[in-house]
Amino acid sequence: MLSRLVDIPAYAVPIGVRWTVSWIVLLSVLYTYFVNRLTQESGPYPPHGVHYPDPVQKTHYVAHVRRIQAEKRALEEVRRKIVEREAFRLLDLPPELSSLVLAHAADWPPTYRALVQVSRRCQDLTFHACLPLMPVRLITSEQLRAFHALLRSRTALACLVHRLWATPLKEDMLPTAIDIVRKCTNIRALASTAHVVESAITLRGGCGSARLSHSACTDLTLLAARTGAWARLFDTPHGGALFARLTRLRLIGDRVPAGMPLPRLTHLSYGTSGHGIRGGGFAVGLAMLADRAAYPTLQGVVFTRPRGSAGGLRVSRPVPTARLFVLDLPATHTELEIWCDSASRRGMWELCADPQVHSPR
């Protein structure tokens, strides 16, 4: 047949060429046939223009197509408005509202550091919103120098520091730590050594109108509270005035002085990093709870000690009738973490506020 179409004798065409051309023609016909069959099959929603055996099916399909097109147009309109709309400006809000928003960054140091680098106005708002809520931790020489330089350049920020941990690792940084505490007179919760507290907190004014320099400080954590440091600090006029105002006191050392008059103290905590406390463990706390003359407002005592076995934090009450709590701390739980949790109102004071104590294993 091929030889007749092209007017070439069949014997002149090689047998291989004849089979190849025949297969090409056959495959082309089969491909065209199956494509036509597939495009003409009717599905649940046949294309517009194809036969509709059921008029109701065509009506449903048209309505479905129009609904999809309307949704696409609405989505495109929303996208267009989002693109054309100006970005939301936090600083356009009133300062009160923007401060409420920025205050949430106090629990997220990376977010706080990013906000203070946006602009000078955003930095000021972030300082005023976050510094009163943040536990400021100054331990290394770099941290002490950087924060000291910040207070020198921005003196108004000192009154915004409400929670401060100042424990320099090197002796040559003690003057810097003392000067920082001395500048931050609006501290509510302070953690430091007896030497820093004794040197930084003073009485101001005359004898008849002497006023404590840090009158807002009611929460104190003393580290390495040795007996000699205790006696020297408590015997000074400013030390006695400070302790008379305290409502929360935590002591870290080998000895807890007893019998000191603390008329406003409501919460007491003491413990060591592993060495025993002279005079007994929780027996000291029981004696303080019973001494209503020296501690008339004392509501609860927390004794902390390292946990001997593996596990998490464990809370117990050795005497059910007394408000004495024993916290067995994991080996990895540091004193800094305890203070940060307490300063953020998420620590041992809140954990032991409920009389019903749970002891997780």
Image: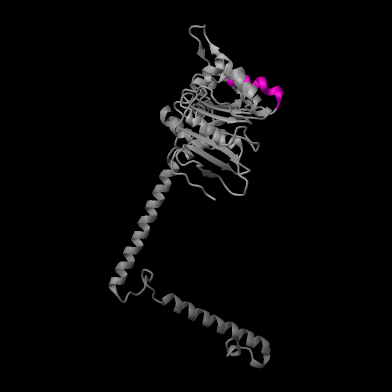
The location of residue 225, given as percent across then percent down, is 62, 27
Question: 331 or 153, which is in the foreground?
Answer: 331
Magenta stretch bounds: 170-181
Q: Quadrant of the N terminus?
A: bottom right
Measuring from the top left, give residue 32's x and y in whole percent: 50, 79
Q: In this view, does 282 lie to the left or right of 49?
A: right
Where in the figure is residue 129, as x and y percent of width and height? Answer: 48, 29
- Identify which residue, 220 or 141, lies in the foreground: 220
Whether residue 171 is in magenta: the answer is yes
The quadrant in which residue 44 appears is bottom left
Task: State the residue in front, 157 or 88.
Answer: 157
Residue at horizontal 55 percent and vertical 32 percent from the top: 284
Please indicate whether residue 133 sits to the left or right of residue 21 in the image. left
Q: Looking at this view, is 35 or 248 the one in front?
A: 248
Q: Is residue 75 above or below residue 20?
A: above
SS assignment for the magenta stretch, majority: helix
Question: Is residue 105 within the magenta segment?
Answer: no
In the rendered structure, the answer to whether residue 325 lies left or right of residue 62 reads right
List x then y, in percent, for residue 87.
46, 38
Q: Residue at x 43, y 48 (%)?
A: 79
Q: How many marks?
A: 0
Residue 42 seen in render = yes
In the rendered view, does 49 fall on the left or right side of 199? left
**Residue positioned most to the bottom:** 11
Quadrant position of residue 95: top left
- Residue 346 visible? The answer is no
Q: Is residue 144 above or below residue 32?
A: above
- Tell me: residue 334, above or below residue 227: below
